[in-house]
Image (cartoon, rainbow, N blue to C red):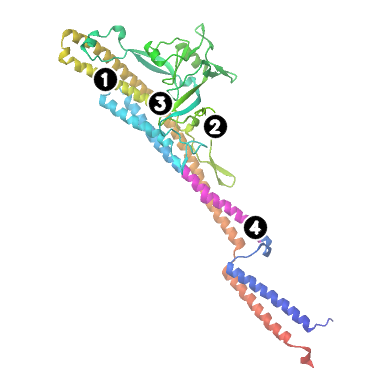
Amino acid sequence: MMRVTNSMISRNSMTNMNHNKVNVDTLNTQMTTQKKIIRPSDDPIIAVRALRLRSNLSELNQYYERNIPDAQSWLEITEGALNNMEKLLENIYTKCVDGSTDVKTQEDRAAILKDLQSLRKQIYAEGNTDCAGRSVFTGYKTNSQLTFLKDDQTVKYEITEPLSYKDIEEKRFYSNNVTVPDTREEVLEGVEIEDMPQEHVIHRIRLSYEALGDITQNDLQYVDGNGNLRRLNGTQYTINGNRDAISVNTTQAYDDWAASGYRIAPNEVKYFKETGELVFGEEAATYIGGQKLQLSITYQKQGFAEGEVRPEHYFNCKNITDGDNPVTYVKENQEIKYTVAFNQELVVNTQAKDVLDADIGRDVDELTNAVQAAIAAHDKVDKLKAMQEEQQYSDEESQAKLKEWLEAAEKEASYADDNMQKVYARGITKFQGHMDRVKLARTDLGSRESRLKLTENRMSNQQATFEKLKSRNEDMELSDIIIEYTAAYNAYQASLQASAKANGQTLLNYL
């Protein structure tokens, strides 16, 4: 049997007391921090699990507290802008329905004109909506507005605009418009039959801008069956057994064409930089429509007016304001995505090309031009009728000539009313299409908002779950700690007392 010495008892007692003391210290620290561990070495398993849970919770907090609210703000602001756009387009649509009716007074026309001019400015203003300084409709170019905010006559672009056979439409041009005479001598000149106002119905494609630069015949192209670009000029065709080639005229000025009575050959295509139009002869329009050709035209434009759309948001183009350092823009899908959950992204932006056509402004301009033409034509009629009542024109000869002038003016007014009615009737279809695009964009936006709301709810639940798991892994209940601490403290006190008694006896006590 091994002999137990006093030193052994003393050493074991010290060891046990120290162990109890460490246990009391550990529980005291836990009671103070209410944490299971202070350092990883206390419990590596809890430490590793804590790191993973904290990492996941940090990521969840980023999604739930920052990414999702940012995405919600972007979507809400976009929804507000789309809602305003729809109301504006609906208002214009209503004006088109109203303007397409037969009977309109000068007051009616003036009211329509005033409304359209104000609505035109507001449409693209909604397109410039921003979220915290970032434009919401311009794709990746969030620091760029959708339109020019003020007139800029220095900026210059080279633009390649895609066109389609579907863009060909009829337009009515009018020659021999009346100029009201100012003197009796002018009145007595009268109006010859051949000088009466005439209407010319011609096919045309309207480009997105006017006041353009010159182009060459090679700048107007189409895509052939193999997907290659071919120049339209010189394209052979056969219609009704007649074989010919399309001729592209890029040099004639618009005023000269108007002075010629809007003459155009059946196989001819004319480009007018002043109005931003391509007009087509009957055979050229028939061939392009029959072949369903997809066209493109490259032109330059220097100087943009306030409210005109910036080309880089709609077309392949170059900013060549600084000829030595051109900036190239390529039309592409520019979706801005937010990560709103683990491995889940949500597109937050709506791109202008999916909502607003680049030529909505020009559609409104055509409506206003038609109204202005009708107002001007009826003003001429009213002025000539007033002249018939003036003393200086009371003689029979003057009255006869004024009747000729009035007949011409009334014919011009009749043409203007008919054109206004047809332009507005066509506007009904166009603006219905514009509204449909906005409604489709709102529907898509609404579905994304619904998905984001579901994700937000899921992230909220996951955040609560991970908080609970984290707490369960790291935290301790204060009541449990107090019980354990009390037991450990009592054990420590008992060990002190036992050690005092054991170490108080020596060999001398037995001698």
Q: Which residues are magenta?
A: 46-74
User: Is residue 244 within the magenta segment?
Assistant: no
Residue at 62% in and 73% down: 485
Q: Which residue carries the number 4 mark?
A: 49
Q: Secondary structure at mark 4?
A: helix
Residue 220 visible in this rendered orientation of the protein = no
Q: CA distance from mark 4 to mark 1?
A: 85 Å
Q: What amino acid is at disc 3?
A: Arg
Residue 13 visible in this rendered orientation of the protein = yes
When asked about the image quadrant of residue 338, the answer is top right
Q: CA distance from mark 2 to mark 1?
A: 48 Å
Of mark 3 and mark 1, the one earlier in the sequence is: 3
Q: What amino acid is at disc 1?
A: His
Q: Which residue carries the number 2 mark?
A: 332
Q: CA distance from mark 3 to mark 4?
A: 64 Å
Q: Which residue carries the number 1 mark?
A: 378
